[in-house]
Amino acid sequence: MKVVIIVQARMTSTRLPGKVLLKVMDKPLLEYQIERLREVRAAEQVLIATTINAADNEIVQLCKRLGVTFFCGSEHDVLDRYYQAAQASHADVIVRITSDCPLIDPVVVDKVIGFYLDHPVYEYVTNCLPRTYPVGMDTEVFSFQALRIAHQEAVTGPDREHVTGYIEQRPDRFCQANVAYKENHSRYRWTVDTPADFELISRIITTLYPGNHNFTLEDCLTLLAHNPEWEKINSHVKQKKYGE
């Protein structure tokens, strides 16, 4: 089976426009994420699913510079963009990662993919139902067949925008499983959706990356334990929920 990581990325974010290309130490956040996702052993390919909007040409140029496969599709119908990208890459298994998670740990991604591959009864496996990993480690793995069904049947705005919403909301139809972390660290927010989020992520990257490009989830937890005041930087930010 061909396992493809598909990352949705666009410049026109409502809360923090251009966030995926914001720079830390003169490198765009999306480049950090791509670098980390290329370390995922269980995936054959990383694909950036961006849009036909001219604003996203910068993302396309970054992909070309890094030699990363990309697909340009609908800006707002993200489900269709995902489906078309998966079809174009001949994916049997799709790993969904969002571009606002530059600290994503390849070990975590491999763990979720491994669980999916080892348990073929499941059509959808995630690590955030319920959430025990920090926000920003979100990984979803599902079959192309499940994606095709969602693409054919989903009609509401939230279902088209959030890709896996149609699948996630129907556990009676799509056999699902959750991969939990050994402790509950769901209070941590390591995603970039606001300036406060960017401030925290910048501190983590500038502290850890120079000494270890492949820093892990555990390295981040240790850093936050040594700097507990950092957690307050974006603790007030509310995570957007399905349908919002």
Image (tube, grey):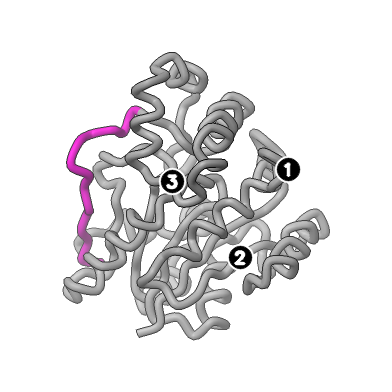
Q: Which circle's residue, 3 or 1, is located before the other in the chain?
A: 1
Question: Residue type at mark 3?
Answer: Phe
Q: Which residue is mark 2?
A: 49
The picture places residue 70, in percent across and down from the top left corner, at 65, 71
Secondary structure state at the residue bearing disc 2: strand
* Residue at the spot 51% in from the left edge and 42% down from the top edge: 211
Question: Residue type at mark 2?
Answer: Ala
Q: Is residue 183 magenta?
A: yes
Few, some or many residues within 10 Å of mark 2 (<14, 14–19, 20+):
many
Q: Which residue is mark 3?
A: 215
The span from disc 3 to disc 2 (Cα, nearest Å) is 25 Å
* Residue at the spot 50% in from the left edge and 22% down from the top edge: 234
Depth check, front residue: 53 or 231: 231
Q: Which residue is mark 1?
A: 26
Depth check, front residue: 115 or 31: 31
Secondary structure state at the residue bearing disc 1: loop
The span from disc 2 to disc 1 (Cα, nearest Å) is 23 Å
Q: Which circle's residue, 3 or 2, is located before the other in the chain?
A: 2
Residue 209 seen by the camera: yes
* Residue at the spot 54% in from the left edge and 81% down from the top edge: 89
Q: Is residue 120 left or right of residue 10?
A: left
Secondary structure state at the residue bearing disc 3: loop
Q: Is residue 158 magenta?
A: no
Task: Give the residues drawn in magenta, as a range.
Answer: 174-187
Question: Residue type at mark 1?
Answer: Asp
Q: Nearer the viewer, mark 3 or mark 2?
A: 3
